[in-house]
Image (cartoon, helix red, strand yellow):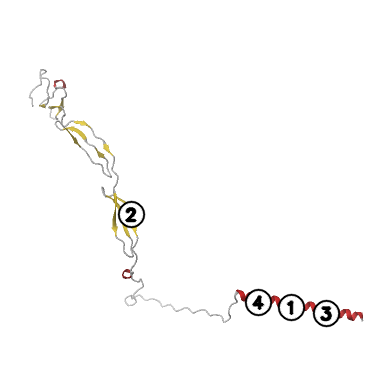
Amino acid sequence: MAVAGAIRPSTVGIAGGVFLEKVKPEYCAEGFEPVPDGNGGCIVCDHAATETRNAVAASCSEKGYTGDTVCATCGKVLLGGEDVPMADHVYSWIVEKEPSAVQSGLRVEVCERCGNRGVAVEIPATGASESEVPESSEPDTLTDPTPHPIEAPSPEPKRSSVAPLTGDANAAAFGLGCVLLAGVCLLAGKLAVLRRRMHYSQSSE
């Protein structure tokens, strides 16, 4: 109830109400207290009904807040809230570019809560098919006006008519040379022995 004028000391045990002027705490009933209303008066309240205000849900980029416990009658903050840590990202894969036969695609991790982009992964090309083979990069001689020099064919190297010696042929030739050299040396030795005998025989006569 609203009471106009001064609150006399005989007025005690106030158990609720809206007053046009301030009420001293000792005039209030047990469990009640005067709460200023911002207009020079007050509300005598026991804060029986409460509600949560100023609550903020945590996100991936900002902290949250549990909210304040406030009296639903007089609006006094009875209990302050607490900060809530930032939430973790919840990623899911999104294909941004589908792969083709000759070009790779792309898939990206995107947070379902805030849209933050995570890891990007390349999707390999599916492989070229006959219908998707890229066109030749050679110029079209019918439509390309740019002159292109004609290269003369290079002459083929002359081939030798003598067959090169292989490893077996070289070994055979080396063996034959050794045999001929041994024969020459043996013949020379026999001629030297024969000359000495003839010399001794002449000197003995």
The residue shown at (86%, 79%) is 197
Q: Report helix, strand or loop for mark 3.
A: helix
Q: Report helix, strand or loop for mark 1.
A: helix
**Three-letter code, disc 4:** Ala
Mark 3 in CB contact with mark 2 (< 8 angstroms): no
**Three-letter code, disc 3:** Leu
Quadrant of res 4 = top left
**Three-letter code, disc 1:** Gly
Mark 2 in CB contact with mark 1 (< 8 angstroms): no
**What distance separates the C-alpha of mark 2 from that of mark 1?**
86 Å
Nearest to N terminus: mark 3 or mark 4: 4
The residue that label 1 is drawn on is 183
* Residue 134 image position (x, y, % from top left): 33, 69
Which callout, 2 or 4, points to the residue nearer the camera?
4
* Residue 122 image position (x, y, % from top left): 34, 57
**What distance separates the C-alpha of mark 3 from that of mark 4?**
32 Å
The residue that label 4 is drawn on is 173
Label placed on residue 194? 3
